[in-house]
Amino acid sequence: MPNPSEASRGRGVSMKRPWAVTVLGLLFIVAGLVGLLYHVTQDPMNSELALVSLLRLLAVIGGAFLLLGRNWARWLTVCWLAIHVLISAFHSMEQMAAHAVLLVIVTYFLFKDRSADYFRTAASRS
């Protein structure tokens, strides 16, 4: 049986996924799918719809791979949200502020110690 120090360094038993990673992964999947379905059914097919669909698909991919413990998915979801902060600046200051607050919260929960340890041990398992 591995000792606790080995498990905490990712050499022993796999670490349980932090609740924040689970919640954020599921939220990105749901937000991406809902947005994708909305735009595909409401907007006429054009190049703008293709770009919006790609962005929504990236949210789904990011969320799914957060759940799988892939470190790059943390960066993808934070960058995805940062792009939304920039896009929302063209709509209203309120939307931009709301997305900026979400960006700070998501970044905090994905990069705090427990989450960072989870992604580190997941990387060492693969």
Image (cartoon, rainbow, N blue to C red):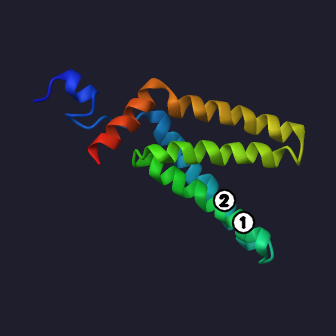
Mark 2 and mark 1 residues within 8 Å of each other at the beta carbon: yes
Quarter of the image where one finds residue 7: top left
The image position of residue 53, as x and y in percent, is 68, 66
Q: Amino acid at mark 2?
A: Leu
Image height check: is 4 above or below 95?
A: above
Residue 42 at least partly seen: no
Residue 38 is marked as none
The image position of residue 5, as x and y in percent, is 22, 21
Q: Residue at x 66, y 59 (%)?
A: 55
State the residue position of label 1: 51
The image position of residue 23, as x and y in percent, is 51, 40
Q: 83 left or right of 90?
A: left
Residue 106 at least partly seen: yes
Q: Amino acid at mark 1?
A: Leu
Q: Residue at x 89, y 43 (%)?
A: 92
Quarter of the image where one finds residue 103: top right
Q: 49 left or right of 106?
A: right
Image height check: is 1 above or below 77?
A: above
**Mark 1 burial class by Cα count in 10 Å: few <14, some 14-19, many 20+:** few
The image position of residue 96, as x and y in percent, is 81, 39
Q: 60 left or right of 114?
A: right
Q: Secondary structure at mark 2?
A: helix
Q: Secondary structure at mark 1?
A: helix
State the residue position of label 2: 55
Q: Residue at x 65, y 64 (%)?
A: 54
Quarter of the image where one finds residue 101: top right
Image height check: is 64 above or below 4?
A: below
